[in-house]
Amino acid sequence: MEHESFEDSTVAAEMNKTFISIKVDREERPDIDNIYMTICQMLTGSGGWPLTIIMTPDKKPFFAGTYFPKETRFGRIGMIELTQKIGASWINDIDKINTSAEQITSAIQNVNDKIGTTEITEEAMHNAFEQFSKRFDNEFGGFGTSPKFPSPHNLTFLLRYWKLTGNNEALKMVELTLSSMRKGGVFDHVGFGFHRYSTDREWLLPHFEKMLYDQALLTNAYIETYQATQNVEYATVAKEIIEYVLRDMTSPEGGFYSAEDADSEGIEGKFYVWNVDEIREILDEKDAQLFITTYNISVNGNFTDESTKASTGDNIPHLKNSISEIAEKIKLNQPELESRLENIRQKLFSVRENRVHPYKDDKILTDWNGLMIAALAKSARVLNDKQIENAAIKSMDFILTTMRKPDGRLLHRSRDGEVSIQATIDDYAFVILGLLELYETTFELNYLKTAIELQETQNKYFWDNVNGGYYFTANDAEKLLTRSKDVYDGAIPSGNSVSFNNLLKLGRLTANSKFEELASQMSKTFSDVVNNAPSGTTMMLQGIDFALGNSSEVIIVGNENIEETKNLLQKLNQAFIPNKVVLFKNRDNEKDLAKIAPFTTDYEVADDEIVFYVCKNHKCNLPTSEIKTVLELLNN
């Protein structure tokens, strides 16, 4: 619509004659987007972007839609005709418009009044699994046909469902989806990182945009699947995503940029595709043939110019088999094949760097950074990688020094040194998530302290004292049409569902019951929504899995600098035990830790040994120094 209508002088003249036109960056103002997208879904039965809203001067909407072409075609009204009809109605039917606007406003303001009364049960998890089973693509992975979105939080839910029930179908869904995505064109095989989504069933033709939150959530899904299966291929993908983010999406100060566009030089995907002649020109004959064969490059190409619908001879590199299968097929040992392909990739990457790059959206968003920090911290812990850990630390330092005001409250956006826009629930929830992951990676107590401080701030400004749950905006934020409150997971998990998980973990880490009491209220508040659409609320269900007793607290007491401690921690971190929290007590932090978690005063520290206390539901087993015993207790 930007190129077709808003930059067109004819359309612009018509719109400016009728409207005051406002363009909103939905990433800077998710609060506005959240409200008006809900209205669009109410009025049309569906949503999406671009989002078109027409409203009265007092911001009450009376018309909503998504994409409108310039001219009317195939039964879809065009922007010029729509503008003219709305203009005529505004003059001739103003009373009807105002009545409609009042009704729509009333409906959106009543949305938050629907609350449940009983807590969510395990049945909702089983129902979610059944819904995923019915939509699962057994050939290519993912859910439904096309387009296919990554939705990694659905996959991490299925990992937990597999862990809880032993149902191998859940693990199969995760593995087939992740391996198919990595082989497909939705993954950037030359520069790494994932594109936004696949337009086809096979994960071949992506929408080429790259979003930070996809990299964060997919890193988390791959690293957890590595923990669950011990298949190093999943760890490799996580490291590749991280390499892309640290190389191309990181500011000098450590914050992470938001996105890279799909198009360059006005053509979507041009930066990412290759033709046979280019490959043969860059590589010697042997390597060129290996790349062409491995990544299915053809003379005719598999990429179509969207503007002409004609084949360009360009190709989206993709795999049809795993590297191990390809190695066997061409009778080459796998390490040698991987080494040759990596050398080829680096040569192609160097050439590609000289192309015109897609535009980089270099604004830094607090919430998306929180997700990336959480993924980096967990990956560093699992992979025992200090470089990744340091990147997470540097980014969190940036958030806490640049995006946090002296009064302790967060801001949402930073760009070119300007920091502004009041934070939403997502900013608080995702940064707290990052802090909790960083604490369990570094055991630096300040991260846990700051997580508690931010949670208290979130409770003060966002909690609904009448019905429970968190509003999307603070109680002193700009007054919009309504204060929305949502638990549905979209491209990213909802702030309420992540907060639910955060509260449960803080409750177990500190033994402060008020955190779990808030979580219990949230379970009641959102129970009807979750029960009606369990597969749309999987992050909340991950918290339910944690809350229903399938969780543990581990208190580690001793010297973290001795080699034995590091070895034992590494074994603990590599295991897939998602429903646990870990505290570390030593000589240096015991007094400060006791202020946060008073119950830890009962555990004595010895300088020359490491002791684990494994507790479930506030009941602790006998201490042990055997990691095998610890893992058995946690997996029981």
Image (spheres, grey):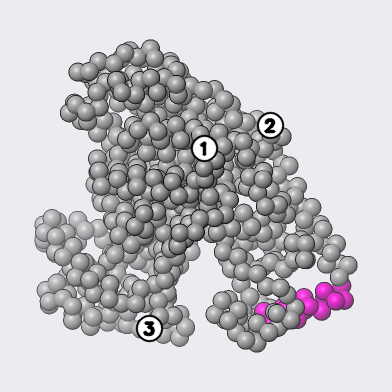
Give the number of the mark in front: 2 or 3: 2
Quadrant of the rendered image containing residue 335: bottom left
Quadrant, the N terminus: bottom right
Residue at point 42%, 71% (across, down)? 359
The label shown at residue 80 is none
Instruction: Answer above or below: position of 199 versus 465.
Output: below
* Residue labelled with disc 1: 454
Main secondary-structure element of the magenta-colored stretch = helix
Apparent side of residue 479 relative to residue 217 in the rendered image (left or right): right
Apparent side of residue 488 relative to residue 148 in the rendered image (left or right): right
Circles 2 and 1, Cβ within 8 Å, touching? The answer is no
Is 587 within the magenta? no
* Residue labelled with disc 3: 311
Q: Nearer the viewer, residue 520 or 531?
A: 520
Quadrant of the rendered image containing residue 99: bottom right
Question: Tag 1: residue type?
Answer: Leu
Q: Secondary structure at mark 1?
A: helix
Apparent side of residue 111 relative to residue 240 in the rendered image (left or right): right
Q: Is residue 49 visible?
A: yes
How far from the left and from the top, in percent, is residue 391? 32, 48
Tell me the magenta residue range: 79-93
Apparent side of residue 522 relative to residue 601 in the rendered image (left or right): right
Q: Nearer the viewer, residue 101 or 321?
A: 101
How far from the left and from the top, in percent, is residue 461? 62, 40
The label shown at residue 117 is 2
How far from the left and from the top, in percent, is residue 266? 44, 80
Q: Residues within 10 Å of mark 1 (few under 14, many from 20)?
A: some
Which residue reaches farthest front? Answer: 406
